[in-house]
Image: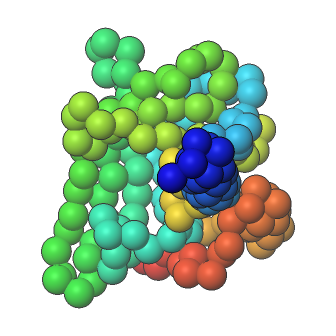
Amino acid sequence: MKKGSRIRKIFSLAAVFSCIASLSAQSVSEKSNANLEPVRNFELERYLGKWYEIGRFDFKWEKNLKNVTADYSLNKNGTVKVVNSGYDYVSKKQKQSVGKAKFAGNQNSGSLKVSFFWPFYSDYKIIALDSEYNYALVAGANKKLLWILSRTKTIPDDVKERYIQTAQNAGYDLNGFVWTEQE
């Protein structure tokens, strides 16, 4: 094989790999929530307490759950204790997951990292929050993790519509999004 032919082959392979890498990066970034902006002027103390899940994507850990709640309280070391619970209407059993959360950076930003399986942490970004801390829209690490939360078992239609619009504007495809039954 001639030297020029070899160089062309190397450049051709490099171009193919570069193209594949570019497409992979684009695909990952479309599914990632790294570019989502969390709420600013966040006050953790006001966010603590009980929240009712209004809607979510039905992923493995929450499949078949109703009456889902999330309870946030402060640990002595400054992290946040997270207690998620719900009733599995198929197995007819109460389920509970206990984890912890910590700020991902600036404590005035609604960007946290949450862990239910130490040492692994995942994104928890509050991307919409009303001024009274009654309703929240929370994004996970990818476009298949999203929650609408409320301090009560219901949410006004205008807030629900606004949060749906915010999610769609952020690139979420809400096919498969479920509304949590709260009794």
Left or right of 144 in this view: 110:
right
- The front one of 163 and 92 is 163
The quadrant of the image that shows the C terminus is bottom left
Residue 147 seen in the figure:
no
The image quadrant of residue 54 is bottom right
In the image, residue 100 above or below residue 93: above
In the image, residue 9 above or below residue 174: above
The residue that appears at 38% across and 15% down in the rendered structure is 78
- The front one of 88 and 131 is 88
- How many numbered circles are shown? 0
In the image, residue 112 above or below residue 60: above
Image location (x, y in percent) of residue 8: 65, 49
Left or right of 178 in this view: 136:
right
Image location (x, y in percent) of residue 153: 54, 66
The residue that appears at 39% across and 44% down in the rendered structure is 71
The image quadrant of residue 62 is bottom left
Image location (x, y in percent) of residue 117: 23, 42
The image quadrant of residue 19 is bottom right
Left or right of 178 in this view: 68:
left
Residue 115 seen in the figure:
yes
- The front one of 81 and 111 is 111
The residue that appears at 66% across and 25% down in the rendered structure is 109
The residue that appears at 45% across and 33% down in the rendered structure is 113
Image location (x, y in percent) of residue 21: 59, 50
In the image, residue 67 above or below residue 166: below
